[in-house]
Amino acid sequence: MNIELILTIILAMISSLLPMVYRKITDSANVANPYIIVAAVLLGILSASVVYSLIALGLLGTLYYFVIYVFILGSIFLTKYLVKLNSK
């Protein structure tokens, strides 16, 4: 397993936290909410990874890892949904 694939898997796991962070941001109207910083860091990491992938791997390599990223992220969200559905 190469390093790009490992990073793609880690990015998908980090991205699955974004809805929770967004919910925490919208729950409180505090401007100095620390979750805003967390969301900015997560989105910064994702965009930096995309730029790195475009520069290092080219368009087709980036598309390959994007498909893997979407598949893993979809699997995580589906698992969360099924666990929530089963717990009701």
Image (spheres, helix red, strand yellow):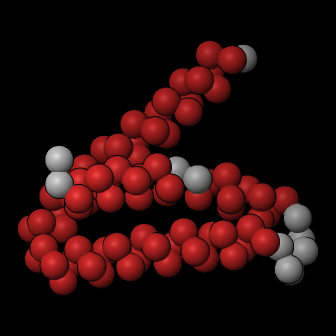
Residue 74, quarter of picture = top left
Q: Quadrant of the C terminus?
A: top right
Q: Position of residue 7 (x, y in %)?
A: 32, 59
Q: How many marks?
A: 0
Looking at the image, which residue is at 88% across and 64% down? 28
* Residue 75 seen in the figure: yes
Q: Residue at x 18, y 68 (%)?
A: 62
Q: Is residue 2 left or right of residue 50?
A: left
67 or 3: nearer the eye?
A: 3
Q: Is residue 70 visible?
A: no
Horizontal side of residue 23 vs 78, given as left or right: right
- Which x, y percent locates residue 69? 31, 53
Pick whichever, 31 or 45, lies toward us. 45
- Where 79 sits versus 21, above or below? above
- Vertical relation: 68 (above or below) 56: above
Q: Residue 27 appears at what percent x and percent y?
A: 84, 59
At x 17% / y 54%, what residue is drawn?
Answer: 2
List x then y, in percent, for residue 13. Answer: 46, 49
**Residue 53 placement: quadrant:** bottom left
Seen at 68% across and 61% down, the residue is 22
Left/right placement of residue 9 relative to residue 63 reads right
